[in-house]
Amino acid sequence: MRAEPTPENRALVTDLAGVALRNPVLLAAGTCGTLDEFGEVLDLSRIGGVVSKSITPEAREGNPWPRILDAGDRVSGMLNAIGLANPGVDAFVHDYLPSAVLMPCAVICSAAGFSVDDYVRVVGALAEAEDRDRAAARGVHGLHVPAAIELNVSCPNVRTGTEFGHAPETMAELMRAVRPAAGRTKLFVKLSPLTPDVVGVARAAAEAGADGLTIANTVAAMAIDVRTRKPRLANVTGGLSGPAVHPLAVRLVHAVHTKLARDFHGKGKHLPIVGVGGVSHWEDAAEFVLAGASAVQMGTALYADPRSPLRVIKGLRKWCEAQGVMNMSELVGAVRV
């Protein structure tokens, strides 16, 4: 059963495009197992939700090892080149997704692909699972799984598929194909921090039917062993995450919120942003909120301390009290510039 928010945490109850969250802290895709494995080390009834590993049409082993490493003493973060390793959509729907009905938090599924047809297939399969599970989930406070689907169009560790998130035209093409396949399921689009026109791509996604945006993915980066003169990752390059990318992500969230999301809200459409990148402490999450994010995702911090989301949640609650607001939503985009 999904636990109701405790009285002291009501200030953090979040509406994410109609998806009800106990609080705005989510576990990011690819950082906490395929779906519910992280429940072994963290009480999932105390967080807002979990984003599944990115799922592709067919099973993938991912890139060769080594494919994850500390960025080093001079860089605060982590490099990974996992390469979208996952069981494939059929196995995921059959073997993993049924357990999501019993998870005590919101479940968002990450969908990835290498062509428009790939995304349509994955989103369609996940949406069909949502329809099948809707009746079963009625006994769990009327919720269903997945609560939303996040389109990963920005993984830097694969050679195709990411182009959909790099230009408004390709983003619109993808969304026009995927939106009907999603049916009633909410769709979020996860954008790259290296997109030349992030506001334009975000606008194209929103106008073609995206219910929200996730900003941003990892930054393409590289590490070299100076003794062997070889790349430290077998894939040569990987995605940089963690505190080093946080200021970049904050800037992008602020830009999209001020130039796009706020306008949509003024026209009667709620276009929430989920901020991702280097959230290790509550202040990092609060920065995202002030920049324009309605929720945040945590990933790299989980490797250092699996219980770090609980400290972030506690800090956000105290911050809301100190700011004199009844709900954190009053602080979204409230930076004074």
Image (cartoon, grey):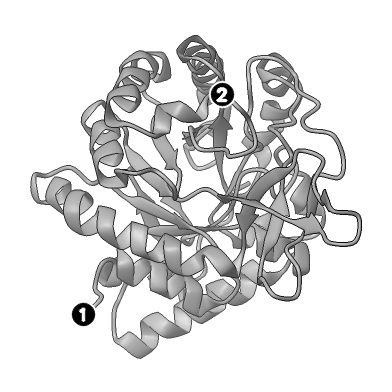
Q: Position of residue 209 (x, y in %)?
A: 27, 28
Left/right placement of residue 46 relative to residue 128 reads right
- The circle drawn on residue 55 is none
Please give the name of the residue rendered at 44% of the width and 50% of the height, measured from the top-left corner: 193
- Tell me where residue 174 appears, x and y as whole percent: 37, 20
Residue at the spot 32% in from the left edge and 86% down from the top edge: 323
Q: Nearer the viewer, mark 2 or mark 1?
A: 2
Q: Residue at x 36, y 23 (%)?
A: 184
Viewer-closest of 164 and 112: 164
Q: Is residue 119 visible?
A: yes
Crowding near the residue tagged with mark 2, few <14, some 14–19, many ≥20 C-alpha atoms within 10 Å: some
Disc 1 secondary structure class: loop
Q: Which mark is residue 336?
A: 1
Q: Foreground: 218 or 129?
A: 218
Whole-percent x and y of residue 214? 43, 47
Residues marked 2 and 1 touching at CB (< 8 Å): no
Q: Secondary structure at mark 2?
A: loop
Q: Quadrant of the C terminus?
A: bottom left
Q: Is residue 170 above or below residue 107?
A: above
In the displayed orientation, state which residue is furthest to the bottom: 322
x and y, in percent, of residue 195 in the image: 39, 43
Q: Which residue is mark 2?
A: 160
Residue 289 shown left or right of residue 284 in the figure: left
